[in-house]
C-alpha cells in the first residue's frame, strides 16, 4: 500500500534511478517524478519506467512532492537546496544520498536559517562502477546498509518516513552522528577510492605500462576496480569531505612509511606483525559481517529446529576449548616476556574478540590455526594505545577483565560492545576499580561503553565481593598487577579460579588463604605453553543430552574439571545421573578428565546453594534436565542468572512453560516440576533465545525428549562460544537442523 502520493527523485542516475525502481516495486508511492538536467537521463528514466514524469525544472515538480530524494553530486547539493527552499512546504520531507553529510548540513543551515526538521540526511552504502540511469537496478540496495544522520531537531515523523523508504528497498537502516559518518566513510570508502585512483594513475604513467597491465592478476583488478568510478563524483566527494579524507590519508601514509622502513631494514618481525594484524582484523570483521557472524543476525537469522526421534546420544568427542581459559591465555600471554604457545584455543567470537583486542593493543599474535595460537608477549609495560575504541562484541568476560588490565595503562581507551553487551552491568567492576584509583566513566546504570582514563596510579585494596563473581575477582587481580602494594579479594562463595592458576603458571605468585586471593603488584610474567582443556560449559549440553535420553552412552574427552567449575557434575550426580570421570590428570595447572555419561532416570532435588556459583553458566541446560526428572527441582541463591546475556531464569521459564513444563519463578531462583519417565516431556513450540547462546543450545537439547519439533529463533549468537555446535550435535545422534534465513 502506497505511503506517499508523489515521490520526487532529483538526479536520475544510478542511485536515484535504482531508488525509484526499488520503491516502485515495493509500492511505496503512487506517483514517481524525476528531475535531471540531462535530456538522455530524463528520456531513459521514462523509457525504463523509473519515473512517470520527468523535467529539467525543479519548479515544475517540487511543489507536488511529498518526499524528495536528492541524488546529485555532493557539491551540487547547495545549489539544489537553494532552488528548493521557496518551492517546498513545511510538511515536505527531503532526504539525500550523498557520501558526505557535514557539508550538506552546513549548506542547508545557511539556506534555511537552521537545519530543517523535515530534512533527513542519508547515505546508501551501495553502488557500481557504471553510472547513469541505464545502470539502475531495483536490487541495488538489497541487504546493503543505509546510514541516516538525524539531529535532535529532526522530525520523528520525517525520520520514520525516510527509514520506511529505504527499508522498502531491502536495505538495513542505521543511524549515526554526522561527524562520525564523515570520519567512518573517509576511512572505509573515500580513502580506498583515492588509493585505487592513485595506483592506476601512477602505473599508467610508466613507459612499460602495457606490460604491467597485461600481466596484472586478480588482486590488482580487485583492488583497482573502484578506479573505474565516476571521476567528477569522486572529485566532489574528496573536496566535500576534505578534512576527514586528509586525516585518513595521513594515517595511511604513516602506515606505508612504517612498511617502507621495515622492507628497507629487512625487519621481518615488523612485516609479519603488520600483515598478521591486517589479515586477522579482516577475517574477524568479515566473520562479524557475513552470514555466520553474530553481528549480522538482524540480516541473517539462524534458527535451530529440532525433530522428534533423536538419540540415543553416543560416541566419543572432544568439545571446543574452555572459553574462560582461552580469554586468559591471550591476556596473560600478551603481558608475558617471551613467546607463549597455546593449543586448544576456542575459535568462537567471544574469544576472538579478546584476541583481536590485543592485536589492536600492539601485540603480535599468530593464528588461530586449528586451535593453535602463538603470542609474542610485550611485557607488563609494552601495550600500545589503540587508535579506536576496542570493540568486544558480545563478550562480557572480555570487557570486565580488560577493564582491570587497562585501568593501569598510561593511555586512554574505550571499551564498547554490541547491543546485548551494552545493556549489561559494568558498575560491579568500575566501582572497585575506582577505589583503587582508576578513572572510569560509564553510561547510565553503569552500562557500557567504558571510558578509561590512562596514567592513573593504582593502589592495592582489599575488596569483599558483594556476590560471587569470578569476572570481578579476576578484574581486580589483573589491575593489582600494576598496583602499589597488595590487592586482595574475598569471595562469599567459591568461583572459578582460572586467573589465579594461570598467573602462577606464568610465574606470578598468587596467595590463596581460604576465600581470599591476593597478589602484590610490580612483578612480571614469563611466557609458557598452554594446552586448554575442553570447556565444561560446552560439554554440559551433551552431558545433559546423554543423561535424559534412553540408551545413551557418551564419552567427553579432556574436559576441564576445575573444582571451581564442577558444579554441573555434582548436581547431575545428586539428580541420579550415571556419570563417571576417568583418566584424571593436570595440564598446565588445570585438572582435566574424560567424562562418561549413560542414561539413567533422574530425580528432582533441592540444588545445594554452595553449588550455585560452581555451575552458574550451566543452569540453562540443567533446567532441561530438571524438566526430565521425577519430582520438583528447586534452585535458590542464583540472582546472578538474571544479569547474564539474558535474564536466564525468566527466559528459560518462559520457554519451559511454552513447552508444557510447569515452573514457578522466584527472584533468586526457580522451581521446576519434572515429568520423569514420560516419553515426551516437551511439546512443540517456537521459542526465542533472546540472543543468548546458552539458552539456544539448552532448548536444542530439549528436542531429544519432545513430541514434535521445537524451533529456536535467532541462534547466530551460538558462534560466540560454540562454533560447530549443530554439526557436532547431529554427529552424536541429535536431530537438529540449522536454518539460515534472510532477515
Image: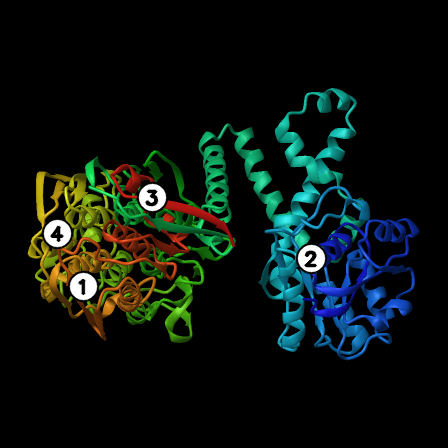
Name the residue rendered at 37%, 72% in the picture.
Answer: 446
In the image, residue 177 above or below residue 579: below
Q: Which residue is mark 2?
A: 243
Q: To which quarter of the image does residue 84 belong?
A: bottom right
| Residue 668 appears in the rendering | yes
Mark-to-mark CA distance, 1 and 3: 42 Å
Q: For this view, does 531 lie left or right of residue 212?
A: left
Measured as percent of width and height from the top left, residue 716 is found at 41, 51
Instruction: Determine whether the residue tagged by mark 3 lies in a helix, strand or loop.
Output: helix
Of circles 1 and 3, which is in front?
Answer: 3
Q: Which residue is mark 1?
A: 488
**Whether label 3 touches label 2, CB < 8 Å:** no
Q: What crowding class fits label 3: few (fewer than 14 Cα within 10 Å), some (14-19), or many (20 or more)? A: some
**Whether label 4 touches label 1, CB < 8 Å:** no
Instruction: Determine whether the residue tagged by mark 1 lies in a helix, strand or loop.
Output: strand
In the image, residue 534 above or below residue 15: above
Of callouts 2 and 1, which one flags the residue occurring earlier in the amino acid sequence?
Answer: 2
**Whether label 1 touches label 3, CB < 8 Å:** no
Q: What crowding class fits label 4: few (fewer than 14 Cα within 10 Å), some (14-19), or many (20 or more)? A: many
Q: Which residue is mark 4?
A: 569
Measured as percent of width and height from the top left, residue 400 is found at 32, 60
Of callouts 2 and 4, which one flags the residue occurring earlier in the amino acid sequence?
Answer: 2
Of circles 3 and 4, which is in front?
Answer: 3
Mark-to-mark CA distance, 3 and 2: 48 Å
Mark-to-mark CA distance, 4 and 1: 30 Å
Q: What crowding class fits label 1: few (fewer than 14 Cα within 10 Å), some (14-19), or many (20 or more)? A: many
Of callouts 3 and 2, which one flags the residue occurring earlier in the amino acid sequence?
Answer: 2
Amino acid at each position: 500500500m502506497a505511503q506517499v502520493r508523489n515521490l520526487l527523485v532529483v538526479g536520475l542516475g544510478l542511485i536515484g534511478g535504482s531508488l525509484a525502481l526499488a520503491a516502485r516495486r515495493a509500492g511505496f508511492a503512487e506517483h514517481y517524478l524525476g528531475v535531471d538536467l540531462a535530456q538522455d537521463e530524463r528520456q531513459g528514466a521514462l523509457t525504463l519506467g523509473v519515473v512517470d514524469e520527468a523535467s529539467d525544472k525543479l519548479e515544475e515538480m517540487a511543489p507536488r512532492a511529498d518526499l524528495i530524494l536528492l541524488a546529485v553530486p555532493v557539491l551540487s547539493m547547495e545549489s539544489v537546496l537553494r532552488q528548493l527552499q521557496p518551492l517546498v512546504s513545511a510538511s515536505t520531507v527531503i532526504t539525500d544520498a550523498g557520501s558526505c553529510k557535514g557539508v550538506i548540513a552546513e549548506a542547508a543551515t545557511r539556506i534555511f536559517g537552521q537545519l530543517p526538521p523535515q530534512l533527513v540526511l542519508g547515505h546508501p552504502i551501495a553502488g557500481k562502477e557504471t553510472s547513469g540511469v541505464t545502470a539502475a537496478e531495483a536490487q541495488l540496495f538489497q541487504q546493503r546498509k543505509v546510514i541516516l544522520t538525524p539531529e535532535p531537531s529532526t522530525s520523528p515523523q520525517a525520520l520514520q518516513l525516510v527509514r520506511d523508504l529505504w527499508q522498502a528497498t531491502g536495505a538495513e537502516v542505521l543511524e549515526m552522528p554526522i561527524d562520525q559518518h564523515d570520519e567512518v566513510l573517509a576511512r572505509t570508502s573515500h580513502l580506498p577510492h583515492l588509493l585505487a585512483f592513485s595506483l592506476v594513475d601512477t602505473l599508467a604513467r610508466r613507459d612499460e605500462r602495457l606490460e604491467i597491465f597485461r600481466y596484472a592478476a586478480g588482486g590488482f583488478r580487485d583492488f583497482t576496480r573502484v578506479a573505474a568510478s565516476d571521476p567528477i563524483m569522486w572529485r566532489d566527494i574528496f573536496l566535500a569531505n576534505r578534512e576527514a579524507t586528509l586525516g585518513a590519508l595521513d594515517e595511511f601514509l604513516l602506515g606505508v612509511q612504517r612498511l617502507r622502513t621495515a622492507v628497507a631494514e629487512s625487519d621481518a618481525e615488523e612485516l609479519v606483525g603488520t600483515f598478521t594484524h591486517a589479515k586477522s582484523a579482516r577475517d574477524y570483521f568479515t566473520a562479524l559481517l557475513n552470514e555466520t557472524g553474530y553481528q549480522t543476525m538482524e540480516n541473517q537469522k539462524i534458527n535451530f529446529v529440532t525433530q522428534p526421534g533423536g538419540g540415543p546420544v553416543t560416541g566419543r568427542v572432544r568439545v571446543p576449548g574452555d572459553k574462560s581459559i582461552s580469554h586468559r591465555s591471550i591476556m596473560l600471554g600478551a603481558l608475558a616476556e617471551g613467546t607463549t604457545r597455546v593449543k586448544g584455543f576456542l575459535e568462537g567470537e567471544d574469544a576472538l574478540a579478546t584476541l583481536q583486542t590485543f592485536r589492536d593493543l600492539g601485540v603480535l599474535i599468530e593464528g588461530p590455526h586449528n586451535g593453535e595460537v602463538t603470542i609474542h608477549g610485550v611485557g607488563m609495560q609494552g601495550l600500545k594505545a589503540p587508535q579506536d575504541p576496542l570493540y568486544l562484541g558480545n563478550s562480557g568476560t572480555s570487557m570486565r577483565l580488560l577493564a582491570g588490565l587497562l585501568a593501569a595503562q598510561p593511555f586512554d581507551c574505550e571499551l564498547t560492545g554490541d547491543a546485548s553487551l551494552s545493556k549489561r552491568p559494568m558498575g560491579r567492576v568500575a566501582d572497585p576499580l575506582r577505589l583503587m584509583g582508576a578513572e572510569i566513566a560509564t553510561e547510565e546504570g553503569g552500562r557500557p561503553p567504558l571510558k578509561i582514563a590512562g596514567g592513573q596510579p593504582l593502589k592495592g585494596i582489599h575488596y569483599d565481593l558483594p556476590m560471587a563473581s569470578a569476572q570481578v575477582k579476576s578484574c581486580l587481580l589483573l589491575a593489582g598487577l600494576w598496583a602499589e602494594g597488595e590487592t586482595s579479594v574475598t569471595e562469599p562463595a567459591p568461583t572459578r579460579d582460572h586467573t589465579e592458576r594461570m598467573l602462577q603458571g606464568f610465574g606470578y605468585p598468587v596467595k590463596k588463604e581460604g576465600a581470599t586471593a591476593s597478589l602484590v603488584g610490580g612483578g612480571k610474567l614469563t611466557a609458557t605453553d598452554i594446552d586448554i582443556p575442553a570447556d565444561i560449559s560446552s560439554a554440559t549440553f551433551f552431558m545433559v543430552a546423554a543423561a535424559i535420553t534412553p540408551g545413551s552412552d557418551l564419552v567427553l574427552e579432556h574436559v576441564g574439571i576445575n573444582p571451581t567449575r564442577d558444579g554441573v557434575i555434582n548436581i547431575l550426580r545428586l539428580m541420579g545421573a550415571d556419570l563417571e570421570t576417568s583418566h584424571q590428570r593436570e595440564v598446565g595447572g588445570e585438572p582435566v578428565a574424560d567424562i562418561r555419561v549413560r542414561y539413567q532416570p533422574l530425580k528432582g532435588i533441592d540444588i545445594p546453594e554452595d553449588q550455585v556459583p560452581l555451575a552458574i553458566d550451566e543452569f540453562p541446560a540443567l533446567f532441561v534436565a530438571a524438566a526430565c526428572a521425577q519430582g520438583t527441582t528447586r534452585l535458590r541463591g542464583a540472582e546472578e542468572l538474571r544479569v547474564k546475556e539474558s535474564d536466564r531464569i525468566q527466559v528459560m521459564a518462559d520457554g519451559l512453560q511454552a513447552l508444557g513444563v510447569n515452573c514457578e519463578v522466584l527472584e533468586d531462583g526457580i522451581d521446576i516440576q519434572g515429568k520423569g519417565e514420560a516419553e515426551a516431556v516437551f511439546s512443540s513450540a517456537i521459542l526465542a533465545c533472546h540472543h543468548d547462546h546458552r539458552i539456544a543450545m539448552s532448548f536444542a537439547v530439549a528436542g531429544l525428549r519432545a513430541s514434535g519439533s521445537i524451533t529456536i529463533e535467532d541462534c547466530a549468537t551460538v558462534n560466540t562460544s560454540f562454533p560447530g555446535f549443530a554439526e557436532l550435535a547431529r554427529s552424536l545422534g541429535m536431530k537438529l537442523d540449522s536454518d539460515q534465513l534472510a532477515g
